[in-house]
Image (spheres, rainbow, N blue to C red):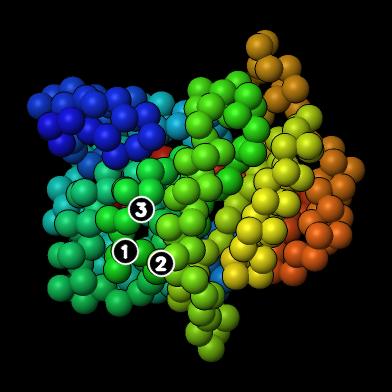
Amino acid sequence: MTVCNLCPRECGKSRGNGSVGYCGVGNDIYASKAMLHMWEEPPISGTKGSGAVFFTGCHLKCVYCQNSSIAFKSAGKSLTPGELSEVFIRLQERGAHNINLVTPTHFVPGIIKALDISKQTGLKIPVVYNTGGYEKRSTVELLDDYVDIYLPDFKYMNSDTAQKYSNAPDYPQMAKESLEEMVRQQPNSVFNDDSIMQRGVVVRHLLLPGNLKNSKSVIEYLYKTYGDSIYISIMNQYTPMREFDKFPELSCTPSRREYEKLVDYALSLGVKNAFIQDEGVSSGVYIPKFDMEGLN
C-alpha cells in the first residue's frame, strides 16, 4: 500500500513503507483474538459459535468505542496472510459456523490473500464481514465473491452526530453507498436446515443514550430502502467505557423506555426481519478479553 485509500478517510499514508494510517496500523495484519463467539445474532452464532477474528486498529474510532483497547492501537499479534489462513482453518475445525472478520477494513488486501489460501486448503464455511459501516463502495467491491454475509453497523443518519462522536461527517453517505453494494452482492437471505445464515445482509444499529431521534431515522431509512430483503439488528448493549466530560449523555446506558420506543417505532413501520435484545445486556459481558487466544 504505497498510498492507502481503503477507507473513506483516504489518509494516503504509505503503510507499506513503515507509516501508519488513520487506522493506527501499518502494512502488517494485526489481530488480538480468534474465538468461537456465542454472542452475535442467533443465525450468526448458532449453537457452536461464530469464528470471530478480532483485528486491531480502526479507521472510525468512535468516542464511545466498546473495543477501544484494540481499536486505538496496533496491539496484537502480527500475522502473514498464510498464518491468518491457518487461523481460519482452525476455527472451522473447531466447529465454527462461519469466519467472522471483525473490524477488517484496513486489512482487506491481506484478508483477501488469506481467504484465497484458506479456500485452497479446505475452507468451506461462510465468511462474515463485520464492520462499523464506514466503508468505501470501491473497497466493498473488492470483496465480491469473498464475503457471504455482510454484518455492518449503520450508526448515524445525521452528519452532525457522526462528526460529534466519530469525526466522520460523511458517515451517513458512505454507509448508504457501501450498504447498497453489500445488498447488490447478497440480495437474498439464505439459511441452512439449522437456521444458520449462509448468505445475506444483517444491519446493526446501536441505540446511544439521548439519541433516540437519530436511531429512528436510521431504522426508517433501512426499512423504507430495503424492506424485508435485509435483517435489522436493534441493539441495546451500549456500555459506557469511561466518564465523558465532553459528552455527558454517553456516561449512562439508554433507558429501558428509550429502547422500547425504538422497537415500537420499528414495528409501526412494518419491520418484521429484526433482532432485538433483552434488558440488561449492557453489562459488558459481551466484550471479550483480547488476549491473543486462538492466534498461535
The residue at the point 45 percent across, 69 percent down is 186
Are the two marked residues, 3 and 2, in contact with CB atoms closer than 8 angstroms? yes
Residue extending farthest bottom: 193
Three-letter residue code for mark 2: Gln
- Viewer-proximal residue among 197 and 240: 197
* Structural distance between the alpha carbons of marks 1 and 3: 7 Å
Taking the image as shown, residue 188 lies to the left or right of residue 110, namely: right
Are the two marked residues, 2 and 1, in contact with CB atoms closer than 8 angstroms? yes
Q: Is residue 253 visible?
A: no
> Counting other residues with Cα less than 10 Å from the Cα at mark 1, is it few (<14), some (14-19), or many (20 or more)?
some
Q: Secondary structure at mark 3?
A: helix
Query: Please, is residue 183 above or below residue 262 in the view?
Result: below
Find residue 125 and report its image quarter.
bottom left
* Res. 144 mark: 1
Three-letter residue code for mark 3: Val
Q: Position of residue 104 (x, y in %)?
A: 35, 46
* Res. 185 mark: 2
> Counting other residues with Cα less than 10 Å from the Cα at mark 2, is it few (<14), some (14-19), or many (20 or more)?
many
- Viewer-proximal residue among 32 and 182: 182
Residue extending farthest right: 257
Q: Position of residue 19 (x, y in %)?
A: 18, 22
The residue at the point 21 percent across, 49 percent down is 109
* Structural distance between the alpha carbons of marks 2 and 1: 6 Å
The residue at the point 79 percent across, 38 percent down is 212
Find residue 119 and report its image quarter.
bottom left
Query: Please, is residue 143 above or below residue 126 in the view?
Result: above
Q: Earlier in the sequence, mark 3 or mark 2?
A: 3
Q: Earlier in the sequence, mark 2 or mark 1?
A: 1
Query: Please, is residue 23 above or below residue 276 in the view?
Result: above
